[in-house]
């Protein structure tokens, strides 16, 4: 089993004539020993970091090894703790991958939804324009029907007057012919 401390240990060496640099620490699962110099910038993306000089690091390392060597029960406990840390790291990695998959699915759904909304908006705008044109056509049709009704009423009135005149003419002709025959 891989031996690992549950925290990050840094070895610091301060040198006055070093170039400043940015050291990024984003891998929080590994034990790292890194030399940094004066004016170096360190960026931590971990929740815990221990910064130690060479002497302190050796003391912690030797105490850790002594505890594992002297007390087998504690060594087993520490091994179990290391296994739990590895399982938790594997679980976090798995959850992170699932989260990224979920984010990608959500992004895809969001793009599709935006596309459908844009398409629906276009269709709705087209339908509104079509309805406006139908409304204009209906208004024009009503106007034309009104004019046609007026023309029909006028024609009907004209026909009735013509029938009355023909009827009156027929009666007058009948009276004239009846008077001529009766004489």
Image: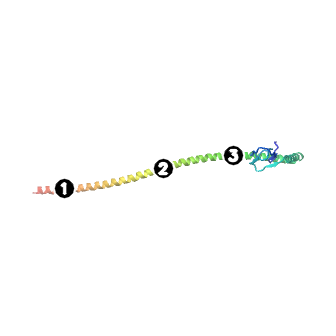
Q: Residue at x 45, y 52 (%)?
A: 132
Q: Residues within 10 Å of mark 3 (few under 14, many from 20)?
A: few
Q: Nearer the viewer, residue 154 or 168?
A: 154
> Which circle's residue, 2 or 3, is located before the other in the chain?
3
Question: Where in the figure is residue 92, as x and y percent of width and height?
Answer: 73, 47
| Dot 3: element | helix
Looking at the image, residue 118 sits to the left or right of residue 155; the answer is right
Disc 2 designates what residue?
127
- Label 2 – label 1 distance at C-alpha: 61 Å
- List the single residue furthest toward the left: 183
> Which circle's residue, 2 or 1, is located before the other in the chain?
2
Q: Residue at x 21, y 56 (%)?
A: 165
- Label 1 – label 3 distance at C-alpha: 102 Å
Disc 3 designates what residue?
98
Question: Where in the figure is residue 157, as x and y percent of width and height?
Answer: 27, 56
Please state, as top left, top right, bottom left or bottom right, where the N terminus lies in the image: top right
| Dot 2: element | helix
Q: Residue at x 61, y 47 (%)?
A: 109
| Dot 1: element | helix
Disc 1 designates what residue?
169
């Amino acid at each position: 089993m891989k031996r690992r401390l549950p925290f990050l240990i840094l070895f610091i060496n301060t040198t006055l004539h070093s170039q400043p640099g940015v050291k990024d620490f984003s891998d929080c699962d590994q034990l790292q020993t890194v030399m940094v110099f004066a004016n170096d910038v360190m960026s931590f993306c971990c929740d815990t970091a221990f910064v130690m000089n060479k002497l302190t690091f050796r003391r912690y390392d030797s105490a850790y090894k002594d505890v594992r060597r002297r007390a087998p029960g504690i060594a087993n406990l520490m091994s179990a703790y290391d296994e739990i840390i590895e399982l938790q790291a594997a679980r976090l990695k798995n959850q992170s991958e699932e989260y990224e998959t979920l984010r990608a699915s959500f992004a895809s759904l969001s793009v599709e939804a935006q596309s459908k909304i844009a398409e629906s908006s276009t269709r709705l705008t087209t339908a509104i324009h079509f309805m406006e044109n139908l409304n204009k056509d209906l208004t024009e049709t009503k106007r034309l029907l009104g004019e046609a009704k007026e023309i029909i009423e006028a024609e009907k009135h004209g026909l009735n007057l013509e029938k009355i005149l023909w009827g009156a003419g027929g009666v007058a002709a009948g009276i004239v012919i009846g008077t001529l025959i009766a004489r």
